[in-house]
Image: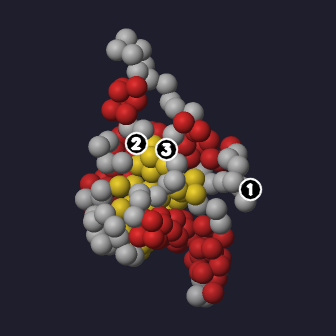
Amino acid sequence: MRHGVRLGLDPGDARIGVARSHPSGMLATPLDTVRRGKDDVRRIRRLTEESDAVEVVVGLPRSLSGREGPAAVKVREFADRLARRLSPVPVRLVDERLSTVSAESTLRSRGRHGQDRRAVVDMAAAVVILQHALDIERGTGQAPGELVPGPTDHAADAPADAAAPDAAPDEKETR
């Protein structure tokens, strides 16, 4: 298990839930909810710096069959922007199927209802996503999910006089 704080993100249309791990990588806890908008990546960068995070894990919404729809396309675009702004801190995409459902169920079972639950469900979903990634790494010894290429990764693949295109999803590293 690699040592260092990781941040976990649950990007939604209105808010981004943020979780933080302990440096040992054993436990994820809620950190913040970031409102979506022009300063969302800046705020996440600040949280990454304040936490001295070594990696950011972003939940990738897939259908139960594993396919990616319009929501996954939006998250991939967001993760690309994030990877460019956070470089050299790596950004990884991990499967987040049912993370929000799991978070809402947990909050309901703990007596959180209505507006009270909605206020923390994004952070709780981020905790589920990050904890899943930590558990995968602890079990396999490998970094979880799919690495999102940062600016240097794109530049290394491009001819000197051309901008690097984004890699197709099936060309990216997956685990």
Q: Nearer the viewer, residue 48 or 159?
A: 159
Residue 48: image quadrant is bottom left
Q: Is residue 62 left or right of residue 157?
A: right
Q: Nearer the viewer, residue 23 or 114?
A: 23
Quickly name the residue at label 3.
173
Spatial separation of the CA atoms under disc 2 and disc 3? 15 Å
Question: What residue is rendered at 51% in x and 40% in y?
Answer: 172
Determine the secondary structure under disc 2: helix
The type of colouring in the image is secondary structure
Residue 85: image quadrant is top left
Front tag of 2 and 3: 3
Q: Amino acid at mark 1?
A: Ser
Q: Amino acid at mark 3?
A: Glu
Spatial separation of the CA atoms under disc 1 and disc 2? 27 Å
Quickly name the residue at label 2.
83
Q: Position of residue 35 (x, y in %)?
A: 49, 55
Spatial separation of the CA atoms under disc 3 and disc 1? 20 Å
Q: Amino acid at mark 2?
A: Ala
Q: Which mark sits nearer the N-terminus, 3 or 1? A: 1
Quickly name the residue at label 1.
65
